[in-house]
Amino acid sequence: MVSHPAVTPFQRLLFKQLRRFIGQAPIRLRLGTGSSSLSDGTGPECVVIYDNSALVGMMLDPEIGFGDAYMKGRVDIEGDLVHALEVVFRAMQGSSKRRWFNRLASYWLEHLQANTLDGSASNIHRHYDLNTDFYKLWLDPQLVYTCAYFPTPSATLEKAQLAKLDYICRKLQLQPGERVVEVGCGWGALAIYMAKHYGVTVQAYNISHEQIEYARTRASKEGLAGQVEFIEDDYRNISGDFDVFVSVGMLEHVGRENYRVLGETIHRAIGDSGRGLIHFIGRNRPEHFSTWIRKRIFPGAYTPSLREAIEIFEQREYAVLDVENLRRHYALTLEHWLNRYERSADCVIDLYGPEFFRAWKLYLAGSGASFRIGQLQLFQVAFAGSACQRIPWTRAYLYAEESQVERNLRWSHAAF
Amino acid sequence: MVSHPAVTPFQRLLFKQLRRFIGQAPIRLRLGTGSSSLSDGTGPECVVIYDNSALVGMMLDPEIGFGDAYMKGRVDIEGDLVHALEVVFRAMQGSSKRRWFNRLASYWLEHLQANTLDGSASNIHRHYDLNTDFYKLWLDPQLVYTCAYFPTPSATLEKAQLAKLDYICRKLQLQPGERVVEVGCGWGALAIYMAKHYGVTVQAYNISHEQIEYARTRASKEGLAGQVEFIEDDYRNISGDFDVFVSVGMLEHVGRENYRVLGETIHRAIGDSGRGLIHFIGRNRPEHFSTWIRKRIFPGAYTPSLREAIEIFEQREYAVLDVENLRRHYALTLEHWLNRYERSADCVIDLYGPEFFRAWKLYLAGSGASFRIGQLQLFQVAFAGSACQRIPWTRAYLYAEESQVERNLRWSHAAF
């Protein structure tokens, strides 16, 4: 970190531009650490910019510039990181102006990270094939890496993840003996839960080698290897006939250019008589996904508006039965993850170094902030084929058996 | 009705074409009434065609041809009308071929019945300004002319309509003193219910003169004239600031070309901090609305796919919070309406004559059949502005107080 005993006119100009860019947001900005440094604004949090490269980078592309500078420790935030990001995101939300550099970066990433069969394999590898021990540091014991469902805000993360698995099973109205296909199964928690508690057979797809290996071991240990098959392959290659299709947190990696293909894949799997559920991060209107997150965290990711996502269902006339927006639950899930993550700072830094630690911290905090201010939404969409006979009369049954979660909680304390 | 002692080759040809058109549907067809007449197919119901004009009309345009011939008594159905229509609709569902005559009629109707300010006034007048006594014959006592919500399938229509009104209030999370704007308020049941049971003030818009007059009288009798204002004007002309926007069964009359205007109207009314609900008949994919229904029953109507409807929310970044598909409830609502309607046959015929009676019978039966087979859907979409603070944590509260409906049922037995 470079000290700034004197402020140059160039720095003064860039600093002023930066302030203009984030407008009246109640946040302080400070250049350098010395007492002679520039500072501006009021608010509980302060963005501290340590050097010129950070200042220039943020002017060229506020998103990537800030993200990379934060990752490298050239920018820091004093005070509550999530709240600071909330304040800045909210200030920038109204402004539709994207810098040319950001547009260029976004365009470039879209092509470099396209979700072809090979492209998806490489994109998924970069994120999900990190060592499982890393995720164990901050996820719940079941390793569920998607939005939890908190029956009440005070529920533990562990309970909320189990409640989410059970909620999805109930939305799907699973019956013993039914055949379920899951695409994007993570470390297998949902597949195993469905088999164990609802008596279904599951084929679960994933292109993360690390996750599939883990899930297989888990199914064997649970004595469910005959009931749950984990398949290391792309969702586009699924085959067989199923009653139910489910996908939790994969649509973000599909890419909007593939929604029709996904719709056809669903139809090949469950035909007109099946039913299903897709759980995904969405938007209130179509918008590019954060270029920094795509560059550093989730290559090839795209979060669609609900309208874009419904393209999946229209071509084969699937009826949308139920859409629920769980955005507040994702904000809380991310709060839990961030707290656990920060408590594991030393371990993460040992594993992947300080830049990696800061990048992921920013990603978790920034995602939390986005859900809090409604820049991101979490949609669960339940749907049914035109000949499906299992359409619930009302949704009251979903809320009649909260105690089931309690019952299932015992399972989580079983050895694994 | 003309008798057919002998069948001509021309009739034989048309009859064969008709059979081909409805394919393998398990329904019988019969030409004429004599014993020498043509007949074909198997199934519990039989379509009886009494004369050549009906046969030719159905070949040119199966939808308008059949509808008009049925209305005029030149075609009849022996057996269960709703089931017969279900069978035929299902058979035709797969076929994407629309006759040129139907395309032409559809195009012509779209222009003739366009939903400009004047056009909407005329379209709405044709349906909703029929004598209220007519609707009293077959609707529930509150005159709620939209899909009911049956807590259980055995609930009475009266109870189910009250349950629907209350369900909407709970989805909207109404609080005493809030300002609500309703567009397309029918005879005022929801506006009065909201004011009376949730303590809100309501401005309710409608361009049906007959309905507005009725609603005003009702509010006065209930002593709610100061709390509920019924305004005879188009939704595009609403003004004032509100906390909540609600519209039940009006979107079908808006026309898809006006969804952006509706979105802007909502934003003018509730801004970014408000919330709302739209309840409407929809589709699984964009499709023209029945030309016969538009010609004879609902001029200017269009039932959007969910994707099309979401255009209303995207432009101002309203978050979709909850979508519920109540199609099975509309099928049951229509069953109740049709039963009551048929029991009132003599009165309807006295009021408007036999052709009118048969046209509306076909409309009620055909709508019921469409909901049963999933050709039509009923969507309730709850939404909130980007700055809305009242987003429920879960939906459990919606189902916790079923008894509230019971409590409110007492209200329905109060004098009016």
Image (spheres, coloured by chain):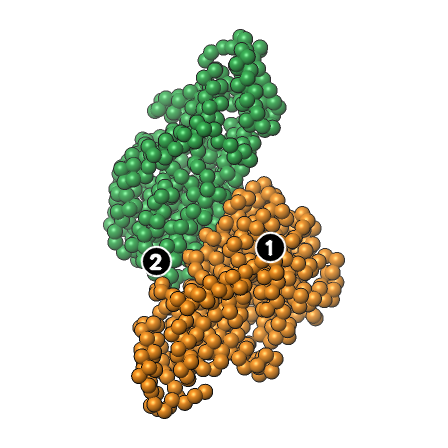
Chain colours: A green, B orange
Up/down of B212 relative to A294, above or below: below
* Mark 1 touches mark 2? (CB < 8 Å): no
| Residue drawn at the location 48% of the way across and 70% of the way down | B292
Confirm whether circles 1 and 2 share one chain. Answer: no
Up/down of B353 relative to A162, above or below: below
Q: How many other residues sit within 10 Å of disc 2, few (<14), some (14-19) or many (≥20)?
A: many
Q: Amino acid at mark 2?
A: Gly
Residue B178, image x, y percentages? 67, 50
| Whether residue A166 is visible | no
| Whether residue B313 is visible | yes
Answer left or right for B92 relative to B223.
left
Residue B125, image x, y percentages? 61, 67
Residue A190, image x, y percentages? 36, 46
Furthest residue toward top: A5
Q: Which residue is mark 1?
A: B246
Tell me the SS state at disc 1: strand
Residues at marks 1 and 2, CA–CA distance in whole angstroms:
33 Å
| Residue drawn at the location 55% of the way across and 77% of the way down | B356
Up/down of B122 relative to B395, above or below: below
Q: Which residue is mark 2?
A: A274
Tell me the SS state at disc 2: loop
Please tell me the numbered disc located at residue A349: none
Q: How many other residues sit within 10 Å of disc 1, few (<14), some (14-19) or many (≥20)?
A: many
Image quadrant in which you'd find residue B347? bottom right
Q: Amino acid at mark 1?
A: Val
Q: Chain of mark 2?
A: A
Residue A410, image x, y percentages? 40, 46
In the rendered image, which quarter contains the N terminus of chain A?
Answer: top left
Answer left or right for B271 relative to B149.
right
Q: Chain of mark 1?
A: B
| Residue drawn at the location 33% of the way across and 32% of the way down | A112
